Image (cartoon, grey):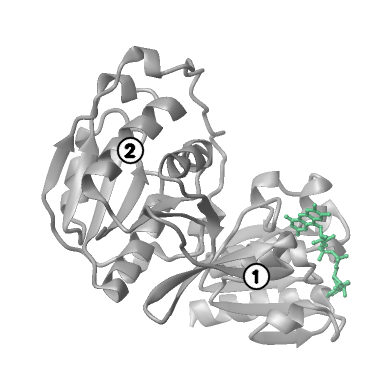
Amino acid sequence: MNGVLVLLEYGGAWNRMSWEALAAGQDIAAQLKQPLMAAVAGRDLDGAIADLAGRPLARAYVVRHPLLSEYTADGFTAAFEQLIQSLTPSLVLLPHTYQVRDFAPRLATRFGQSLIADVIAIGMETGEPVFVRQLLQGKLTADYVHSGIGPCFVSLQAGAFRADTLTPGECTVEDFVPRLEGSQIRSQPGERFRESAQTVDLSAASLIVSVGRDIKEHGNIPLVQELATALGAELAASRPICDNGWLPMERQVGSSGQTVSPKVYIAIGISGAIQHLVGMKGSKAVIAINKDENAPIFEVADYGIVGDLFEVVPALTAAVRKAKSA
Ligand SMILES: Cc1cc2nc3c(=O)[nH]c(=O)nc-3n(C[C@H](O)[C@H](O)[C@H](O)COP(=O)(O)OP(=O)(O)OC[C@H]3O[C@@H](n4cnc5c(N)ncnc54)[C@H](O)[C@@H]3O)c2cc1C
């Protein structure tokens, strides 16, 4: 077995997490000194080919078949099973998307393997990759290593790996046509899920201003919105804010919200409950503003301001505006 194969997701447009998975693949393939390969299945794949040709891959495969034009777990599992049998990679990486959650455990089982799911980091020990997962809502992390015969299957958490570390390159894109029959596809695809027009992709934001419960009322949200606007940041929140309907659910960060990894995360009046931390601890720098110097958020903060947000935030906004106009 040789090579790292990344299974990308494309449904007329790329799922952004595909590039995070490819970036992780690039890194681990270099460490293992193995070739990096990628594959994509689905519909309207012509648009995908040009993008793949500019990636740092030994080879890329476009998995084509009329029975793959609509996603089904049966079709994708059977098609990728045949591709993996022909390529015999040592490691198969996937983005931890909803689609991947649907078919990847079954795909792994076809090779006598379990999917190591929702991995947040990959280390190396004595030349072997070690995959880190969170347990118990992020209270613990656990290391997983591959065992048994067959490729190792791993899905990667959204926001855990940075797509901007992916280097440009070039590669040959080949067609792979699996042998599929209609009788293999037992499910009928339903109507395609459409995301609401106002969906915010916080996981792609490089600057986030996040607000917690003690902003006290809906009418105070503009206070933090102004800071976000001055900085050019996305506005996010802890769960109580979204539960109260003061900001839409799509702006919630945490175990039941989005996972983010911005360059800077400013946590305002957020205590740092574990369910919030699991969603933002991949941030490159954390700035916490909290009036309680013992708030747990300060344990993950790179910079802390102990103070009343109603004084600190307007002062910060004014300082940012002044600096920008200078
Ligand atoms: C299954 C489950 C899933 C969950 N998922 C999520 C999730 O996805 N995301 C999430 O965020 N939470 C989630 N939670 C909730 C989580 O446990 C916490 O209750 C929540 O994160 C607390 O939000 P908070 O920090 O805004 O509020 P609090 O914990 O109440 O903290 C408010 C903070 O503001 C500070 N403060 C008060 N007044 C001021 C002031 N004037 N100036 C400055 N600081 C001030 C206080 O010192 C305090 O630290 C989940 C819980 C469960 C059980």
Q: Position of residue 323 (x, y in %)?
A: 53, 82
Q: Secondary structure at mark 1?
A: strand
Q: Position of residue 270 (x, y in %)?
A: 78, 69
Amino acid type for the residue under numbered disc 2: Phe
Q: Residue furthest left?
A: 172
Mark 1 burial class by Cα count in 10 Å: few <14, some 14-19, many 20+: few
**Horizontally, is 29 left or right of 315 in the view?**
left
Dots 2 and 1: beta carbons under 8 Å? no
**Horizontally, is 103 left or right of 248 in the view?**
left
Q: Position of residue 72 (x, y in %)?
A: 44, 26
Q: CA distance from mark 2 to mark 1?
A: 30 Å
Q: In the rendered image, which residue does mark 1 sit on?
A: 141
Amino acid type for the residue under numbered disc 1: Thr
Q: Which residue occupies 48% across, 15% down?
A: 188
**292, 3: nearer the viewer:** 3
For the N terminus, the quadrant is bottom left
**Horizontally, is 29 left or right of 249 in the view?**
left
Q: In the rendered image, which residue does mark 2 sit on?
A: 80
Q: Which residue occupies 67% across, 57% down?
A: 253
Q: Is residue 79 in view?
A: yes
Q: Position of residue 291 (x, y in %)?
A: 86, 80
Going from N to C along the chain, the mark reached first, 2 or 1, is 2
Residue labelled 2 has its Cβ within 8 Å of some atom of ligand 1: no
Q: Is residue 269 above or below residue 77?
A: below
**300, 307: nearer the viewer:** 300
Mark 2 burial class by Cα count in 10 Å: few <14, some 14-19, many 20+: many
**310, 281: nearer the viewer:** 281
Question: Quarter-wise, where is residue 35 in the image?
Answer: bottom left
**Horizontally, is 136 left or right of 167 in the view?**
right
